[in-house]
Image (cartoon, grey):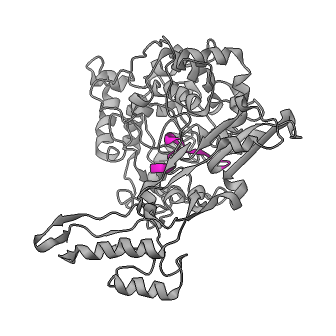
Amino acid sequence: MKIDITKEIVFKTARSGGSGGQNVNKVETMVEGRWHVENSTIANDEEKALITDKLNNRITADGFLLVKSQEARTQISNKAIVVQKMNELITTIEFTIGVNSSYNVNGVQTDDLDPMKGMFWTWNTGYIYAKLEGQSDSSHAPSNYFSYHVGGYKTNENALRKVLLNLPANNQKTLSTIVIEADILKWFDAAYDIKISVIAALLCFTIIGAGFITIGKHRTTPLKFIVPKGWPKPVYNFKENPLTVEGFDLGKKLFYDERLSKDSSISCASCHQQFAAFATFDHNLSHGYNNSFTTRNAPALQNLAWQKDFMADGGINHLDVQPLAPITAPNEMAETIEKIITKLKKDSVYRAMYKAAFGDETINTQRTMKALSQFMLMLISSNSKYDKVKRGEDSFNLPQRLGYEIFQQKCISCHKEPFFTDFSFRNTGMPVDKTLNDIGRMKITQNNSDSLKFRVPSLRNVDVTMPYGHDGRFFSLSNVFEHYRNKMQPIATTDSLLKNKLYLSNFQIGQLTAFLYTLTDTSFLKDKRFAPSGFYTTPFIHNH
C-alpha cells in the first residue's frame, strides 16, 4: 500500500525565460510543505539566521519559502541557493497525517476528504484515517472481535499522527515526492490468530473499494432513466453508478429493511413513506431509535438526481453519502455501518442480490450506498395535473388558473419550476424553536450570515407532505400562509424578498391553494415499483 502525498511537500514555481540568463516570475508561489525555519527541526539558530539572510528574506515567518511575483526578474542563482541550503541544513521533515477535529465537527468535506473518494466517515465516528478490524483468539469481545482505528470522535488522541522523516545526507533530499508505506503483514507478526478474510481496511486516499469490479461474464440489466420533457440535465453522475434493474431492486430491499437500524425497528421507509411522497405524513419531527426524536421534519424524496446537496442545511454534498447520516445518527436509526454490513453478510438473499448487482457476493459500504442511490434516483415525480397541463394533455379550471397566475407573481422567485424549488437556503422569518435550537445552515458554514437559513422545499406533492417547515411547525397550508402574511419575525438574515411580509387576500389564498393541489402526482404516490407488494396505502388527497 502506497499513499502519494506529493502536493503536501512539493516545491513549485512558475518562471519564463528572460534575457541574460534571468528568469521572470509568472506567479507568486511557495514551498507547500512546511520546511520550517523559525520553529523547526533544522540545526540551530545561527543556521536559521544564515539561510534567512542568504535568501534575501524570502522565507516567511511561517517557514515558507516565498518567490514574489512582483519581482520582475530573479536571478537563477537564487533558486540554486535555496536547493543547496535546504540540502545542507534540513535534516528532518515533520508533518501530520489524519483528519483534525475541526473537520470532524463540521461534517462531510469535499476534495480529498470526500467519502465518495474512499474516505471513511459517519456521523457517529467522524473521519477515520486508518481502520483495521477482524477477529483474534485473544479477544474477549463477542465473536472474538477486535478493532484498531486512527482518528474519529472517540479516539481524538489518535486523530492526528506525526510523521518524522530523517533525511539522508545525499541528493535524495531534493526528491519532490514522499511515499508512505504501511507493512500490513507486521500486524500479524504477534501471537494473535487474526483471520485475514474478515478484515476490513479502509484507508485515506483509498486503495480498497475504489470502484466496481466486473468478474467474468457478469451481466446486469440496464435501467433507463428518463428525463421529463423540458427538464434540465440531472446533476448526478450516472457514469460513477450506472443504473441497473439489479441495483435498483437491491436498493429497494435495503430501503425497506428495518435491520438497518440498531434494534431492527426502523427502516428508511419508516420516515419516508411513499403515500406522502416519501416524507413523513402527519408527524412534525421524525421518530428515531429508543423513542427519540430528531430536530427536523423528514423531507420528501423526489427528483433527487437534480439535487446537488442534501439535508435541510445542505450538510451532505452527494446522494451516495446521504444515507449514512440517518443510519448512524443516534436519534434516528442509531446503527453502525459495520454492524449493518455484518447483518447483510449473514443473509443468503442479500448475498445473491449483491452478486446480481455487482458481480460477486462482496457486501461493503460503497455498494450498499450506491444501491440505495439507484433506488432513490428513480423516485421521479413528473406526472401531476400541472405536468399534464404543461404537456398539453389537460387544462386548469378557473381557480387553478388564477392560482397559477398568483403563484408566478408571489412565489416563483424561490419555488422555481419545474422542481418548485431553487434549492437555495433562505431565512423565511421563522423564529428559532428554543427547545430545538436549530440554527440551520450556519451549523455547516459557521457563517453568521447563514443563521436560520434552511433549504427552500419543493412544493411538488405539497398536499400530502404536511406538516410543513424544517421542523414541521405548520400543520396546514393555511398556517403557512398566515405565517407569511402576519407572523414572520424578520432578523438580519431574513431573505430580502420577505422582509416586508407577503400580502395575500383570503381570495388569493384560496386560488393559490387550488393551484398547489395540482402539483400532486398520484401516479408517483401509487407506483408499485417503489414499494414491496402490499406495502403502500394512500391517505386522503384532495380531488384535483
Asked if residue 343 shows in the view, the reply is yes
In this rendered view, identify the residue nearer to me: 78 or 462: 78
In this rendered view, identify the residue nearer to me: 164 or 239: 164
Instruction: Locate residue 33: give its quadrant.
Output: bottom left
| Part of the protein shown in magenta | 110-125
Image check: 53 left or right of 337? left
| As drawn, 78 above or below 205 | below
Locate the C terminus and report the quarter of the image it occupies.
top left
Residue 124 on the magenta span: yes
Residue 518 drawn at (x, y percent): 39, 27
Residue 310 on the magenta span: no
Q: Residue at x 79, y 41 (%)?
A: 146
In this rendered view, identify the residue nearer to me: 350 or 83: 83
Locate the N terminus and report the quarter of the image it occupies.
top right
Asked if residue 67 shows in the view, the reply is no
How many numbered discs, if any? 0
| As drawn, 377 above or below 530 | below
Image check: 271 left or right of 4? right
